[in-house]
Each structure stands twice: as C-alpha cells, then as structure tokens.
C-alpha cells in the first residue's frame, strides 16, 4: 500500500468518535470504509452498537445482536437507537441506520450483566496455530479484487487455503487486527471494536472461487461469549466455515478467539455470493 493511501484512511476509532460527538448521530461514510458502493458491513454494525451505547444509559455488556443489512449506504448516514425493554439483568435495544434513500440497517441488541451459574462449559476449542508473525501478510491491492475497506486491517492466513484458490474445503482461518495502532488502543467500547473486526475476513466461500467475485452480507447474528474482551497486540483468530452454499447464498458459522485461545464471539452469517 502506498504512503498516500495509508494517509487517506480514516481510522475506525475516529469514525466512532465522530458518531458520538454528532448531535443527531449523522456522519459521513469515508471512501476508505467502503465495500463496492456500500459501507463495510462490520462498520455499519459497529455504528449501530455505538449508537445504542450513546443513547441508552447504564448499559451492561453486550451479549448478542442481530443485524439485517437492508441497502447500501450513500455518503451521509444517520443512526438512531432506542430502549425496548430494561429488566433486572438484561437490556434490549434497537438501532437503525438510514440515509436519504431510506433504511439501511436494522439491529436488535441485547445487553446483560453476568449471572452466577452452576454451569461452566466450553466446546469452542481454538485451532492449533502458530503466532501471527509466523504467517505471511495477505494484502492484495484493491484492483486484485479486495474491497477498499480491507486496507484498514492486517490479515495473516493461518489455514490451508487462500482466497480464490478453488479449494473444496470452505474453512477459512485467519489472524486479524486493525492496521492502525490508534484503532488497536482506541478509547472506544471493546465490543464495538470487536464487531468492527469480526466481519472483516472474507467469506469462506471465496476459497472455493477461482477468480474474484462480489459477495455481500445479508444478515449477521452474534453472541458475545464474555464481557472480558481483550487480546495481545490487537490480534484475533477468526474461523469462518461455510456450511452450505447454493443458489447464490452461503450460510456460514464464525468463531473468534483471542491470542490465548479463549473464545470471545460466535456468530452466523447469510451471505449473497454473486460468482
């Protein structure tokens, strides 16, 4: 990436801070945060979570969320959020993003305090991988098929297959982190940053393709597995596994671990595959 391209990037953390400072939660979508003509889905989802945190007082940690991506964002977007219900432990909120053309994203968000429990079970065992530095940096230029927003992240492929390799095993394992150190140490809610990076790796279906082709997330549901969101040096291990692909749609399961192999987030996506 050229020095000029790097200097043009608007940090993820700066976008979140701009949203929180905006009186009506209206912001401009940076060109460096786009995926084709749309805003990068992880950024759109993170903006909805940040809007809810700004609008609803005394929120406990984020526990789960469901995002429906309705339409592509234009340059100026507005995010609104409201309280649906407050219980003893859980708070349910709603957020939505719109622009001059109409609705863009619907989000339902569940926040909840930890509860005492006699059950402690975990079957999300992290794959046996080496440290991120042991894998080569994957940084294709936009002209090679990578979306523009990808410039904001560092990705090191820890699995067996590369994008567009034509493999028969759509199991994508990557180390991911924000490229900018300012984003890795930003003063924003950790759950917001995690949502932003959780959607950054390409769909596992791209491993089966032989040439670049557009993909677009339709729906995304996430479960936060802990309220202790932390890792070393900004790196997260993310595994995307396509469970079924046909008719132009892919259903995939995703798991995210920190550097110590602790599961932090599990999610599912339905993705439109145009290739």
Image: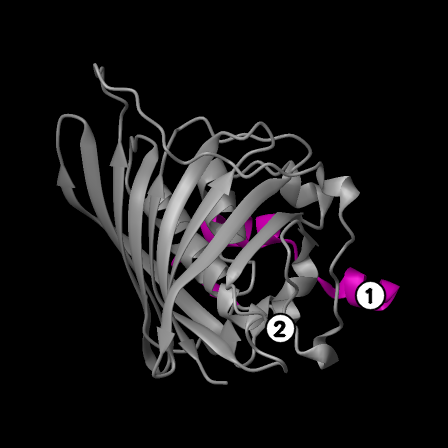
Whether residue 206 can be seen here: yes
Question: For the view shown, which residue lies furthest in the front direction?
Answer: 168
Image quadrant where one finds the N terminus:
bottom right
Expressed as whole percent of the image width and height from the top left, the position of residue 21 reads 49, 49
* Up-down relation of residue 103 to residue 267 (above or below): below
Q: Is residue 127 left or right of residue 146?
A: left
Numbered range of the magenta stretch: 1-28
Element marked by disc 1 = loop
Q: Is residue 107 left or right of residue 9?
A: left
- Name the residue rendered at 66%, 64% in the picture: 162
Element marked by disc 2 = loop
Question: For the view shown, which residue lies furthest in the right direction?
Answer: 3
Find the distance from the CA under tag 2 to the CA under tag 1: 13 Å
Expressed as whole percent of the image width and height from the top left, the position of residue 136 reads 78, 52
Residue designated by label 1: 1
> Which quadrant of the structure image shows residue 234?
top right
Q: Is residue 87 left or right of residue 69?
A: left
Task: Say which of 73 and 127 sits in front.
Answer: 127
Whether residue 203 can be seen here: no
* Up-down relation of residue 143 to residue 240 (above or below): below
Labels 2 & 1 near each other (Cβ < 8 A): no
What is the crowding at mark 2: few (fewer than 14 residues within 10 Å), some, or many (at least 20)? some
Task: Say which of 165 and 103 sits in front.
Answer: 165
What is the crowding at mark 1: few (fewer than 14 residues within 10 Å), some, or many (at least 20)? few
Q: Is residue 80 left or right of residue 272?
A: left
* Up-down relation of residue 56 to residue 87 (above or below): below
- Name the residue rendered at 51%, 36% in the picture: 126
Mark linked to residue 147: 2
């Amino acid at each position: 990436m050229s020095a000029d391209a790097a200097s043009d990037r608007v940090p993820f953390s700066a976008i979140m801070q701009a949203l929180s400072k905006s009186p009506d939660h209206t912001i401009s979508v940076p060109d460096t945060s786009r995926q084709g003509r749309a805003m990068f889905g992880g950024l759109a989802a993170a903006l909805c979570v940040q809007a809810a945190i700004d609008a609803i007082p005394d929120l406990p940690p984020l526990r789960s969320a469901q995002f429906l991506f309705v339409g592509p964002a234009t340059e100026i977007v507005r995010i609104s959020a409201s309280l649906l219900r407050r219980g003893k432990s859980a708070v349910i909120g709603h957020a939505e993003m719109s622009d001059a053309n109409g609705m863009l994203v619907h989000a339902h968000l569940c926040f909840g305090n930890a509860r005492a429990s006699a059950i402690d079970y975990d079957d999300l065992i992290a794959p046996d991988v080496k440290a991120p530095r042991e894998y080569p940096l994957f940084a294709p230029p936009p002209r090679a098929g990578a979306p523009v927003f990808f410039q904001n992240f560092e990705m090191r492929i820890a699995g067996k297959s590369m994008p567009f390799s034509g493999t028969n095993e759509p199991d994508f394992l990557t180390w991911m982190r924000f490229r900018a150190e300012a984003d890795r140490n930003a003063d924003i809610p950790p759950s917001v940053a995690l949502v932003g990076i959780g959607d950054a790796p390409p769909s596992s279906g791209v491993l089966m393709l032989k040439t670049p082709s557009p993909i677009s997330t339709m729906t995304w549901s996430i479960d936060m597995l802990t309220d202790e969101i932390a890792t070393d040096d900004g790196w997260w291990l993310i595994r995307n596994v396509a469970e079924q692909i046909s008719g132009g749609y892919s259903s995939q399961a995703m798991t995210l671990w920190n550097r110590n192999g602790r599961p932090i987030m599990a999610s599912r996506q339905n993705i439109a595959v145009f290739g």
